[in-house]
Amino acid sequence: MSADSQITLYRLQGCPFCERVVDRLDEYGLEYESRFVEPMHSARNVVKRVSGSRTVPAIIDDETGVTMSESGNIVEYLDDTYGDASAEEPATSAASGDDWWLISKW
């Protein structure tokens, strides 16, 4: 983590949702600054000031001006913003579409 980190991650020690975001940041090789917050939800005033909510994880991306919370939203944002656009789309499962019942009845 450098002082030049453009992403700030507000997180809670041992939080699996926060770790999901950390894993994605690491996967893309993004530098970020971690700010660990109070475990007690009602004491997370710093997170509320920056994101409007006391939930973690929350990120601020100075590069794009985005501030958001909720791990699923953050991971999707990181994928859309920093993911490899040339990567192939994930293959659809054989159980998609109208054939799902064939597999489930097998």
Image: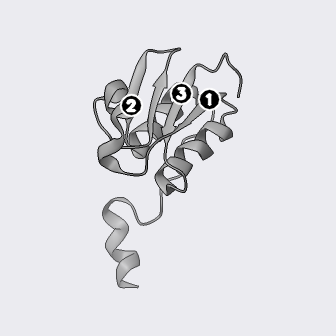
* Front in this rendered view, residue 6 or 102: 6
**What is the quadrant of the N terminus in the image?**
top right
Q: Residue 32: which numbered mark, if any? A: 1
Mark 1, residues whose alpha carbon is within 10 Å: few (<14), some, or many (≥20)? many
Question: Is 5 rendered above or below residue 38?
Answer: above
Q: Label 3 to label 1, Cα distance in Å?
A: 6 Å
| Quarter that holds the C terminus | bottom left
Mark 3–mark 1 contact, CB under 8 Å?
yes
Give the residue at the far bottom of this rendering. Answer: 106
- Pinpoint residue 3: horizontal percent, then vertical percent: 68, 18
At a point 71% along the width and 22% down the height, the residue shown is 2
- The part of the image, by quadrant, that contains residue 72 is top left
- Viewer-proximal residue among 8 and 87: 8
Q: Residue, x 63% and y 21% (percent of image)?
A: 5
Left or right, 60 with respect to 43, comes to: right
| Element carrying mark 3 | strand
Residue 67 image offset from top left, x and y in percent: 39, 25
Asked if the residue under mark 1 is in contact with the one under mark 2, i.e. CB atoms within 8 Å, the reply is: no
In this rendering, does residue 42 appear at all? yes
Q: Position of residue 102 (x, y in %)?
A: 36, 76
The amino acid type of the residue labelled 1 equals: Tyr
**Is tag 3's residue or tag 1's residue first in the polypeptide sequence?**
3
Report the Cα–Cα distance between label 2 and label 1: 18 Å
Near-viewer residue (26 or 54): 54
